[in-house]
Amino acid sequence: MKAISAKKEKWFVEAAFPGIRRCKKDTFRVEKEIFSGRTKYQKIYIFESLGFGKMLALDGIIQFSQSDEFIYHEIIAHVPLMTHPDPQRLLVVGGGDGGVLREARKHPLKEMSLVDIDEEVVGIARQYLPFVSQGSFTDKRLTLAFQDGREFIKAHKNHFDIIVVDSTDPVGPGKALFQGDFYKSVHEALTEDGIAIFQLGPFLDFDIIIKGTVEKLSKLFTYLNPVRLPMPSYSCGCEYCFLMASKKVDPAKLALPVLKRRLQQRLGAKAADLKYYSPEMHLASLVTPKIWRLKKR
């Protein structure tokens, strides 16, 4: 694989999600092609588009743009980390672009681990999208593993306080991270008050993806909370869903003063670097429209 120097296409078209969203396609004007190639596991395309900046697509699906990636990464990292009373060990499953690590390393964690099945994604992202990781892969607290995330997790029972599953959509290499046996392994890898957060997809796919995931996780975790965020570059009407699963801590009972105190104690001056996350946005992200509320157990 190699970088692209000449423009060959004028538009990038994100096709409808296979078998699910068949009514709509998103089209982005390609101002500059940056990289195109295929790893052992997936096709990678990086380009620049007016208004969005640099964009990453895996297997034809947009993963983020330069204009909005901070929303995704700040919410998926800081919401579970701030919810936990004293997180020390964090695992990121997927996340080879380094965005979750960038945010997590702002916390006084003792240990960070990242496992991604596709090592080439990490190298390509570091070379062509350095604004995402911002040197996170050189953090001395970090352990990197390039293997099946399911096998890595099975070898670390009762070890992590926080697990962030920053997977692709449930097709291709990301499909295995939406299965019941994987969720069981995540539960076993967490400490007794551990918290996990999962990338799920648009709320418009609530009946297709989210409800089924909730059903599987409700057999394992005490508390399940959808986490809302906007992602303008996504083909989902800007309403996107993460799902936070907690063994012991009830996220809905966290008070604003507690979150403000934790933010100051843990991040200190680094809190000024945040663009989207705040204690107020933390609580707002847990407010769900009536149609998408989970049934109480």
Image (cartoon, rainbow, N blue to C red):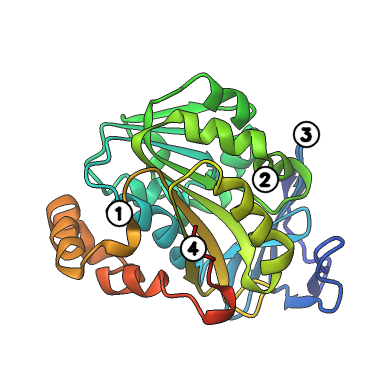
- Pick whichever of labels 1 and 3 is earlier in the sequence: 3
Disc number for residue 40: 3
Instruction: Calculate the distance from the C-alpha at mark 2 to the C-alpha at mark 4.
Output: 22 Å
Residue 276, by quadrant, is: bottom left
Disc 3 packing (10 Å; few <14; some 14–19; many ≥20): few
Tag 1 secondary structure: helix
Task: Give the residue at x 25% y 46%.
Answer: 107
Instruction: From the image, tell me which residue sits under label 1.
Output: 83
Mark 3 or mark 4: whose residue is earlier in sequence: 3
Mark toward the start of the polypeptide (2 vs 1): 1
Task: Check contact, mark 2 vs mark 4: CB within 8 A.
Answer: no
**In front here: 40 or 124?**
40
Find the distance from the CA under tag 3 to the CA under tag 4: 42 Å
Say which residue label 4 marks: 296
Viewer can see residue 118 = no
* Residue designated by label 2: 178
Please tell me which of labels 2 and 4 falls first in the chain. Answer: 2
Label of residue 229 in the image: none
| Residue sitting farthest toward the front | 297
Binning the other alpha carbons within 10 Å of mark 4 as few (below 14), some (14 to 19) or many (20 upward) gives few
**Real-space Cα separation, disc 4 to disc 1, in angstroms:** 20 Å
Amino acid residing under circle 1: Thr
